[in-house]
């Protein structure tokens, strides 16, 4: 029953977080194949391969997976879609991202893996200078807000 599925993961910027600010890249998953995953999960792993918190997204009400019904009643996924609109990573360090897609076999009443991808290293740097010194754009915005009487 398991159709071959190839999965590709693209992480879009920003790739670096400031102190106290979460890293918020967008994770886009491309699937080639006909098996429709029941869910897709992502896990952050440190460089020793130990998983940390599971990242939520894709299957919740806020960002449902865009299933499409085919003529034979099976559900398929579009070739490319964004599963996680925002990944929040607060701790500075280097990580890998493990993305796991599983489908459900109704006859066997069990889930089985259809695809998985481990990304390249994500480097979350601790940029204290960037966090403490405002950029020219931030300074201009601050002046505008002061002029408008916000504080």
Image: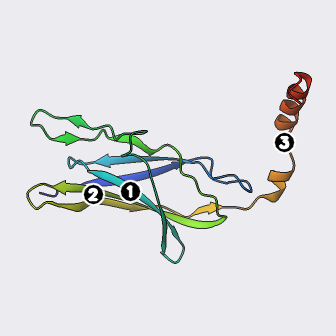
| Circle 1 residue | 41
Figure quadrant of the N terminus: bottom left
Label whose residue precedes the other's in the sequence (3 or 2): 2
Q: Residue 35's spot in the image, x, y percent?
A: 21, 50
Asked whether residue 110 is in view, the answer is: yes
Q: Kindly identify the residue that appears in the image at 30 percent across and 54 percent down.
A: 6
Q: Judge by depth and name the residue closer to the eye, 122 or 17.
A: 17
The CA distance from mark 3 to mark 1 is 36 Å
Q: Position of residue 80 (x, y in %)?
A: 37, 41
Q: Residues within 10 Å of mark 1 (few under 14, many from 20)?
A: some
Residue matched to label 3: 135
- In which quarter of the view is residue 67 placed? top left
**Total residue callouts:** 3
Disc ID at residue 102: 2
40 left or right of 23 in image: left
* Mark 3 or 1, closer to the camera: 1
Which tag is nearer the camera, tag 3 or tag 2?
2
Packing grade of label 2 (10 A; few <14, some 14-19, many >=20) is some
- Residue 93 position, x and y percent, is 64, 67
Horizontally, residue 123 falls left or right of residue 148, namely left
Q: Helix or strand or loop: what does disc 1 sit on?
A: strand
Dot 3 and dot 1 residues touching (CB under 8 Å): no
Q: Residue at coordinates 82% horizontally, 35% vertically from top-left?
A: 137
Q: CA distance from mark 3 to mark 2?
A: 44 Å
Which of the 4 quarters of the picture holds residue 144? Answer: top right
In whole angstroms, how far apart are the C-alphas of marks 2 and 1?
Answer: 9 Å
Q: Which residue is farthest top?
A: 148
As helix, strand or loop, the secondary structure at mark 2 comes to strand
Query: Viewed as shown, does residue 4 lie left or right of 62?
Result: left
């Amino acid at each position: 029953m398991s159709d071959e599925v190839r999965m590709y993961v693209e992480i879009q910027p920003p790739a670096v977080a400031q102190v106290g600010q979460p890293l918020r890249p967008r994770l886009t998953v491309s699937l080639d194949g006909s098996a429709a995953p029941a869910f897709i999960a992502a896990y952050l792993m440190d460089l020793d391969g130990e998983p940390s918190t599971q990242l939520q997204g894709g299957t919740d009400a806020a960002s449902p997976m865009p299933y499409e019904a085919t003529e034979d009643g099976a559900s398929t996924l579009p070739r490319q879609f964004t599963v996680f609109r925002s990944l929040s990573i607060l701790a500075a360090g280097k990580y890998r991202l493990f993305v796991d897609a599983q489908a459900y076999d109704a006859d066997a009443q069990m889930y089985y893996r259809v695809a998985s991808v481990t990304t390249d290293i994500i480097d979350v740097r601790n940029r204290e200078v960037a966090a403490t010194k405002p950029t020219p754009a931030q300074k201009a915005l601050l002046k505008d807000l002061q002029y408008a009487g916000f504080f």
